Amino acid sequence: MLDLRLPFDEPYCIPQHTASVINDVKSKGGRLVAVGTTVVRALESAANVDGSVGAGNGVASGRIGRQTPIHVADTILTGVHQPGESHFELLEAFASDAVLAKISEALSKHSYHSHEFGDSLLIERRRGMPRR
């Protein structure tokens, strides 16, 4: 099964200006919205424990899931992902199983489509939710 091999390593480049803006926002207590699972993986790969991000090139490797410490992204805008997929597993770093179950139920009930077909969702971590 291909999904067991996912996600593949993904190269990324974070420009100095982007890192500076992220670091400024985070230092002032602001919240950061990551657009897509690839962006979350890049930002978290480039992150320091304090939530700051270094500029430069790197490779995001490994899976992000329930037990992964999230240091940068507070919110994710992403396509609809199905339970059991590696991309859905990443969402577990942002929301509890109960919340994700409610989301999945609502998406199914209202015939939303997976991300390849354009439907999206926004998941924001609550302020004060412990960084894992």
Image (cartoon, rainbow, N blue to C red):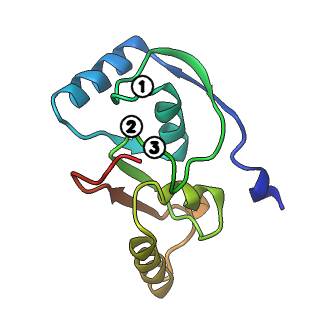
- Determine the CA span between mark 1 and mark 2: 7 Å
- Determine the CA span between mark 2 and mark 3: 6 Å
Q: Amino acid at mark 2?
A: His
In percent of width and height, residue 78 lies at: 46, 54
Quarter occupied by residue 23: top left
Residue depicted at 46% across the width and 77% down the height: 101
Q: Which residue is mark 3?
A: 69
In percent of width and height, residue 56 lies at: 51, 14
| Disc on the earlier residue, 1 or 3 | 1
Q: Amino acid at mark 3?
A: Pro
Front residue of 25 and 127: 127
Q: Are marks 1 and 2 in contact (CB under 8 Å)?
A: yes
Q: Which residue is mark 1?
A: 48
Q: Amino acid at mark 1?
A: Asn
| Disc on the earlier residue, 1 or 2 | 1
Residue at the extreme bottom of the image, as rendered: 109
Local secondary structure at mark 1:
loop
In percent of width and height, residue 118 lies at: 52, 61
Q: Is residue 119 left or right of residue 25?
A: right
Q: Is residue 103 left or right of residue 5?
A: left
Q: Quadrant of the N terminus?
A: bottom right
Local secondary structure at mark 3:
loop
- Determine the CA span between mark 1 and mark 3: 11 Å
The correct choice, above or below, for 14 with respect to 25 in the image is above
Residue depicted at 49% across the width and 75% down the height: 112
Q: Are marks 2 and 3 in contact (CB under 8 Å)?
A: yes
* Label ID, residue 71: 2
